[in-house]
Image (cartoon, helix red, strand yellow):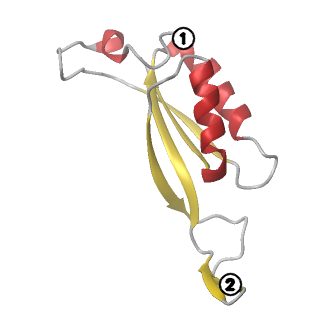
Amino acid sequence: MKKIEAIVRTSKFEDVKTELKKIGIDFFSYWEASGVGNEITRGHHNYRGTVYDTQYIPRILISIVMKDANVAKTVDCIEKAAFTGEVGDGMIFTYAIDESIRISNGARGESSTSGPGDKI
């Protein structure tokens, strides 16, 4: 099993979600996240009389655990949907998962991850 974490622009989140649904990923977790990057000048900027803090970059962190066989297609889907061609499009990470346990029924291993990616 693998865990995919993707950090994407907030403006591309709906595109990523839509494309994941098209390939059968209809369940995943996500969080609003902030980070510091090199693509913008850090600090505060005035725009039309309002001060904006540009030190932190808003992003969405997506987390999916799935069977190994579905990882490549899912990563490819996220990469294409999140792409703008600009610096700051985000990152995708994959991790090996040693154990997975579904609390509601005690299922372990790959049988506990039924849902995300089973339709792929």
Residue at 62% over, 35% down: 16
- Residue 75 lies, in percent from the top left, at 62, 27
Of labels 2 and 1, earlier in sequence is 2
Residue at 60% over, 43% down: 13
Left or right: where does residue 109 sit relative to residue 70?
left
> Can you tell which of label 2 and label 1 is closer to the viewer?
2
Q: CA distance from mark 2 to mark 1?
A: 46 Å
* 36 shown above or below 49: above
Write down the residue under mark 1.
69
* Quarter occupied by the C terminus: top right
- Residue 40 lies, in percent from the top left, at 72, 70
> Judging from the image, what secondary structure is the residue with disc 1 in?
helix
Q: Residue furthest front?
A: 48
Left or right: where does residue 96 sit relative to residue 48?
left
> Judging from the image, what secondary structure is the residue with disc 2 in?
strand
* 83 shown above or below 43: above
Mark on residue 45?
A: 2
Q: Nearer the viewer, residue 41 or 84?
A: 84
- Residue 1 lies, in percent from the top left, at 43, 18
Report how many numbered discs are placed on residues in the image.
2
Q: Residue furthest bottom?
A: 49
Q: Amino acid at mark 2?
A: His
Q: Residue furthest right?
A: 85
Look at the numbered discs 2 and 1 and tell me whether their residues touch, using CB distance below 8 Å: no
Q: Amino acid at mark 1?
A: Ala
Left or right: where does residue 12 sit relative to residue 30?
right
Residue at 68% over, 26% down: 76
